[in-house]
Image (spheres, rainbow, N blue to C red):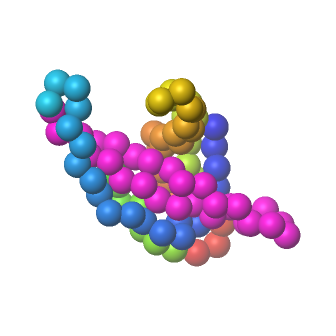
Amino acid sequence: MQFSGFIEKVFAETEIKGKDNKSLSKREFLLTIDNGEFPKSICIEVWNDKVSDPNIVEGNLVSVECNIQAREFGGRYFNNIRAWKIEKDKNMPF
């Protein structure tokens, strides 16, 4: 799935211990999609090598390719949107 918009907020990097006690890095950012009268925001996460992607800067107009998946926890389901490619959007003015 692909989204284009501007990065409204970048959250702090967090360290998480994996199942094998290996340390993993995670960062989230808020992408705002302005497609008319009602702009929408999406919280997108990146892991490990993508955490330090130079395109993840507040105010950048970007195109994000990501996977959407659901996970179950305690009988409830939660959606995760994980980016695997982030590029400055060449079609949008900066």
Tell whether position 44 is magenta. Answer: yes
Q: Please provide percent x and percent y for residue 88.
A: 52, 59
Q: Which residue is at the far left?
A: 21
The answer to whether residue 22 is above or below residue 31 is above
The dominant secondary structure in magenta is strand
Write the residue at 60% across / 55% down. 42
Tell whether position 82 is magenta. Answer: no
Image quadrant in which the N terminus is located: top right
Q: Can residue 45 be seen in this view?
A: yes
Write the residue at 29% across / 57% down. 13
Depth check, front residue: 84 or 10: 10
The answer to whether residue 91 is above or below residue 44 is below
Residue 21 horizontal side relative to residue 13, left or right: left
- Where are the magenta residues, as a range? 22-48
Q: Please provide percent x and percent y for residue 56.
A: 42, 61
Q: Please provide percent x and percent y for residue 26.
A: 32, 48
Write the residue at 20% across / 38% down. 17
Residue 88 horizontal side relative to residue 54, left or right: right
